[in-house]
Image (cartoon, rainbow, N blue to C red):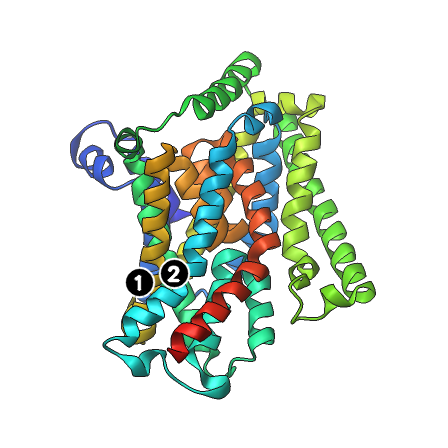
Amino acid sequence: MMALGLVFYTESKKTGFWYKFYRIIPGLLMCYLIPAIFNSFGLISDEISESYFIASRYLLPASLVLLTLSIDLKAIFNLGWKALVMFFTGTIGIVIGGPIAILLISSFSPETVGGSGFDATWRGLATLAGSWIGGGANQAAMLEIYEFNQELYGGMVLVDIVVANIWMAIILLGIGKRKKIDKWFKADNTAIDELQNKVQAFSDKITRNPSLTDIIVILAFAFGAVAVAHLGADNISVYLKDNFEAVSNPKSALSSFGSGFFWLISIATLIGVLLSFTKAKNYEGAGASKIGSVFIYILVATIGMKMDLGKIFENPGLILIGLVWMTIHALLLILVAKLIKAPFFFLAVGSQANVGGAASAPVVAAAFHPSLATVGALLAVFGYVVGTYGAILCAELMKIAAAG
């Protein structure tokens, strides 16, 4: 919170050094990097702290409810086909990026992509594919399906954390330059602007000075929904695992439907959408989305805590594979965005719905505007659904590439 306070205070300056600094470096990126620096120097510990778990399991679903409270669902659907195209482009980028990275690295360092049996590098990289298309549940499914040596699995987790966090930092940097990027893409932002303007106009119309009662009721909506979402997620995931072999079997492509986190995010978003059709949406005037944004920024800081900058050089070969892989993902997104004139918003959120999943896609979407957080959450749900299928395809292609 001190890091966030420092960033927000200095970013509010309209003259001097800080004004010039934040014209180059986005404040959101600093909210992410400062905790990463603290963690890297051992001042705080992601391993000991439960901050990320609390933020992702309680504050994230609460923020989704509050940021969805005043949403115009019709306006979200009016965003059109480009959002889905960029999401699936991101998926394809991960699927083909893995085997291409193996082929490129093997040309000068075959031992990096080698290994045999259950120690084979491609088996470990299959878990990365699961993580970067869906999330943790898909990653765990890939570990079970391809039976990678669990003693070596820590190296793959390291690549996942380092490369995914570097890519998220680049995206956050890009958000600060989005007008220039959109101009280069020749993007049409009309639908996004209309959605933002609708939400802003509604908020301006009902804005009032919030009373203590207003704030308590807003928090009651948020955490009441979180409680319901946890209750539903626990029971649904257990019921599906107990009654459906396809869900309970970790090797099944449908195993991600047994993930409690998947149902937690889905139910919280659904509750927010349902509340947007009631008088509860008027609490936007008392600052519902501002409180939701506070929760999002806390989540950003705790995601930053997971990054240890010193570990970037621990396993350079595997990190290099991950960086080449992510570069292919990024280049394909840029190419398609340029071809279809998609806004940078769709590129950023489409990518994070794959690579970051439900924990970071709403964060990136909300960085453009709080009203857009729901778009990130909905696309991340797509990621869970297609994650294991896409990862299996990627793993089989990597197996062929490694054999070659």
The reply, left or right, for residue 360 in relation to residue 220 is: left
Asked whether 388 or 197 is in front, the reply is 388
Q: Position of residue 269 (x, y in %)?
A: 64, 40
- Closer to the N terminus: mark 1 or mark 2? 2
Residue located 58% across and 47% down the image: 382
Amino acid type at circle 1 is Val
Query: Which quadrant of the figure has residue 106?
Result: bottom left
Q: Callout 1: helix, strand or loop? A: helix
Residue located 56% across and 74% down the image: 143
Residue located 56% across and 23% down the image: 75
Query: Residue 97: which numbered mark, if any?
Result: 2
Q: Position of residue 370 (x, y in %)?
A: 49, 32
Residue at far top of view: 205
Amino acid type at circle 2 is Gly
Q: Are marks 1 and 2 in contact (CB under 8 Å)?
A: yes
The C terminus - image quarter: bottom left
Residue located 61% across and 27% down the image: 73
Number of marks drawn = 2
In the rendered view, would you say 282 is above or below 187?
A: above
The answer to whether residue 277 shows anywhere in this view is: yes
In the rendered view, would you say 207 is above or below 264?
A: above
In the rendered view, would you say 14 is above or below 111?
A: above
Residue identifier under label 1: 324
Q: Cα distance, mark 1 to mark 2?
A: 8 Å
Asked whether 333 or 272 is in front, the reply is 333
Disc 1: CA contacts within 10 A as few (<14), some (14-19) or many (>=20): many
Q: Position of residue 28 (x, y in %)?
A: 36, 42
Query: Which quadrant of the figure has residue 228?
Result: top right
